[in-house]
Amino acid sequence: PYMSKSDGRVVSNFIYQGLSEKNLTIAGDGLQTRTFCYVSDIVDGLFKFMDADISGPINLGSINEIGIRELAELICKKLNISKNFTFYNVSKSEPFNRRPSILSAKKILNWEPKINLENGIEKTIEFFKINYFQ
């Protein structure tokens, strides 16, 4: 929630496109994977990191990868709309997979995400409906 309808990120793009009755636009074949972590989980991790007596980087995020096309299908299901996709060329510099290792966060901070992707998407859809479609 609280993302701009035009911020260019995949979750907000798909939700806004779906609610606007447009095709969901997918880069490449949609087989590239990403992980998504709900903002309150990240904030919780940041507070734990700031309170810890450690220095140096530590990864926060989700380890649950999902394909971009699979994400689009999930959002269509949550919106109860048909799966209508438009594919476009993907940038050669775009990585195929992204997944942080959160082993240090689990071990040192006793942190891991609590809100799963489906619940986060549902909360974001409700925000978009209330703020952009009423």
Image (spheres, rainbow, N blue to C red):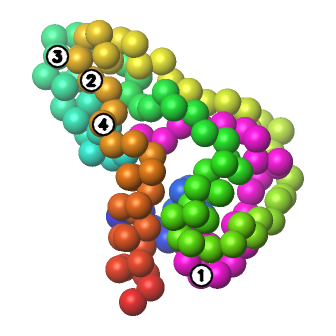
Identify the image quadrant of residue 66: top right
Q: Residue at x 41, y 19 (%)?
A: 102
Does the residue at mark 4 contact the one at mark 1 (Cβ under 8 Å)? Answer: no
Per the image, label 2 sits on a secondary structure element best described as: loop
Q: Nearer the viewer, residue 122 or 88?
A: 122
Precedes in sequence: disc 4 or disc 1 = 1
Compared with 83, 129 (above or below) is below
Per the image, label 1 sits on a secondary structure element best described as: loop
Does the residue at mark 4 contact the one at mark 2 (Cβ under 8 Å)? Answer: no
Per the image, label 4 sits on a secondary structure element best described as: loop
Which residue is denoted by mark 4 in the rendering? 114
Residue 28 percent location from the top left of the image: 82, 49
Q: Nearer the viewer, residue 19 or 60?
A: 19
| Label 4 crowd bin: few (<14), some (14–19), many (20+), radius 10 Å | few
Number of marks drawn: 4
| Label 3 crowd bin: few (<14), some (14–19), many (20+), radius 10 Å | few
Q: How much space separates mark 4 and mark 2, taking CA atoms?
A: 9 Å
Q: How much space separates mark 4 and mark 1, taking CA atoms?
A: 30 Å
Compared with 127, 131 (above or below) is below
Which residue is denoted by mark 2 in the rendering? 111
Work out whether residue 57 can be spotted: no
Q: Say which of marks 4 and 2 sits in front.
A: 4
Which residue is denoted by mark 3 in the rendering? 52
Precedes in sequence: disc 1 or disc 3 = 1
Q: Which residues are magenta?
A: 15-37
Which residue is denoted by mark 1 in the rendering? 20
